[in-house]
Amino acid sequence: MSKKDCGNHGEQKRHKLFRRLFAAFLLLVIVALLVVLIVWLVLRPTKPKFYLQDASVVQFNLTSGVGLLTSVFQITLSSRNPNDHIGVYYDRIDAFVLYKGQQITAATALPPGYQGHNDVIVWSPYLYGAAVPLAPYLADALSQDENAGYILLYVRVDGRLRWKVGTWISGHYHLQVNCPVFLTIDGSNPHGDGPVPYFHFRQMTSCSVDV
């Protein structure tokens, strides 16, 4: 056998070895992914449950004619993790108030953190909106709602979360929460200044959650 034939034979052996090693590595990756998928399907993480427990109106002034709204709210928002074997990392979470789809307060960052199995987290932030310009039709609608004695707002929570199963942590998922805030107005408010006690939040409401 010539030296050239021996060289080709050795090169073929190396190629076969590389192919076998690559096939073994690919098989290990596939098995690991299947294990993760099976665990994920068996555990089936359930979305966190959010509740708006309370909403207080500290300030709510609409400047007639120019359509500028200044408002301050204090809300109490809770989240419960209903999973028995899955934890939740909240990496970023912001809250703000909407009126008919328009954001009327700045986004307030809520403290991030980890939520264990069946744990409950409660936040009580202030949400501020200073001289927020409203579209003319929204300013008119808001004035009509005030005259009618009720206002429907929404507290929106927007953020990112990760799931934790044992030592495995998932990638980021987008979190969006919508909480209806139905406020009734008592026109017989006896107070002329300070907080605005004539806005009443009826009761704790459950929120819709999309992940």
Image (cartoon, helix red, strand yellow):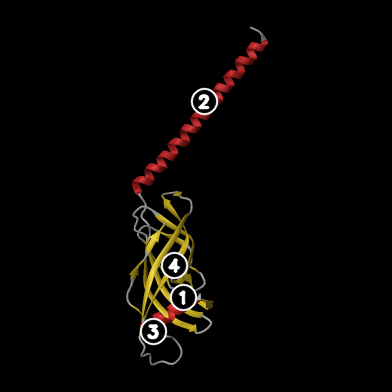
Front-most of residues 179 and 161: 179
**How far from the left and from the top, in percent, is residue 206?**
34, 67
Mark 4 touches mark 1? (CB < 8 Å): no
Label 1 vs 3, first from the N-terminus: 1
Identify the residue under disc 1: 138
Name the residue located 46 percent from the left edge and 34 percent from the top edge.
28
Crowding near pointer 1: few (<14 within 10 Å), some, many (20+)?
A: some
Mark found first going from the N terminus, 3 or 4: 3
Q: Amino acid at mark 3?
A: Asn
Q: Which residue is mark 2?
A: 20
- Under circle 4, the secondary element is strand
- Amino acid tagged 1: Leu
Question: Which residue is disc 3 drawn over?
Answer: 147
Q: Residues within 10 Å of mark 2 (few under 14, many from 20)?
A: few
Would you place residue 134 above or below residue 26 in this image?
A: below
Q: Amino acid at mark 2?
A: Arg
* Above or below, comparing residue 176 to residue 63 in the picture: above
Q: Look at the numbered discs 1 and 3 and tell me whether their residues touch, using CB distance below 8 Å.
A: no
Which of discs 3 and 2 lies nearer the camera? The answer is 3
Contact between labelled residues 2 and 3, with CB atoms less than 8 Å apart: no
| Residue at the extreme right | 3
Q: CA distance from mark 4 to mark 1?
A: 18 Å
Quick one: SS at disc 2?
A: helix
Q: For the point 39% across and 76% down, which residue is it?
A: 55
Q: Label 4: which residue?
A: 156
Query: Looking at the image, is mark 4 or mark 1 earlier in the sequence?
Result: 1
Indicate the quadrant containing the C terminus: top left, top right, bottom left or bottom right. bottom left
Is the residue marked by circle 3 packed among few (<14), some (14-19), or many (20+) residues within 10 Å? few
Q: Tell me if label 4 and label 2 are in contact, CB under 8 Å.
A: no
